[in-house]
Image: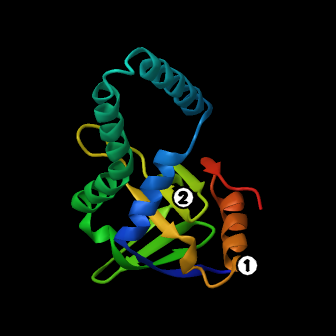
Amino acid sequence: MNGRLAVDADLTFSDLYRFNRSLSLGLSIKRRIFFILSIALLSYAIWVWRHNVLLILVPGVLLTVIIFLSPYFAARMMVDWCPKMLGQAEYSFSEQNVTISRPMESVELLWEYFACIREAREFFLLYTPSTGGEAPRRIFVIPKRCFSSQEEITNLKLLLQRSYCGRLELRRT
């Protein structure tokens, strides 16, 4: 690939919700062990307290509601912290940098600026370093649905492998 790769992205709240849901549902080894131990403990609690079902049902229902609502609230917090993250943006990738153009603003960031770049099933994620204090790190979420073809996605992955020297986590194809 020579030159620049440009992608017009339209990030929606639904995209942010799916992104946060994929983070919360990603099962690492620790989460799998915790889940298995929780099921075992719940089974034991049902057997021991079978006469007082409310002691089991109320926390179980609350935990289920929290699990399903947490991605929504995480997405809402992302939008509250940075309202400009939603809507139209053009991402233009080159060997040296990525240019992010939105209505009324444009920023050019060198690859060295990013702390990590990850590829998820539905998104590319560009993480900026944390500035410390109260400000969280910023995440640029680029939906894969915005690429015009699988070839563009492959070209971006090749460009990242050549140009980005930091922590790069790409999915196997």
Picture residue at 35% right of the left edge, 69% below the top: 13
Picture residue at 49% right of the left edge, 49% below the top: 23
Other residues around mark 2 within 10 Å, as few (<14) / some (14–19) / many (≥20): many
Callouts 1 and 2 close, C-beta under 8 Å: no
**Type of the residue with mark 1:** Glu
Could you tell me which secondary element the residue under label 2 belongs to?
helix
Other residues around mark 1 within 10 Å, as few (<14) / some (14–19) / many (≥20): few
The quadrant where residue 58 appears = top left
Q: From the viewer's perspective, tell me whether residue 127 is left or right of residue 132.
A: right
Q: Nearer the viewer, residue 146 or 101?
A: 146
Q: Nearer the viewer, residue 161 or 70?
A: 70
Q: From the viewer's perspective, tell me whether residue 114 is left or right of residue 107.
A: right
The quadrant where residue 172 appears = bottom right
Is residue 77 shown to the viewer in this render?
yes
Picture residue at 51% right of the left edge, 59% below the top: 125
Cα–Cα span, label 1 and label 2: 22 Å
The quadrant where residue 108 appears = bottom left
Q: Disc 1 or disc 2, which is closer to the eye?
A: 1
Relative height, residue 59 to residue 170 (above, below): above
* Residue 70 in picture, x, y percent from top left: 34, 48
* Residue 157 in picture, x, y percent from top left: 69, 65
* Residue 20 in picture, x, y percent from top left: 43, 54
Residue position marked by numbered label 2 in the rendering:
111
Q: How is the structure coloured here?
A: rainbow
Residue position marked by numbered label 1 in the rendering:
151
Q: From the viewer's perspective, tell me whether residue 173 is left or right of residue 60.
A: right
* Residue 164 in picture, x, y percent from top left: 63, 56
Which residue is at the far right?
173
**Type of the residue with mark 2:** Trp
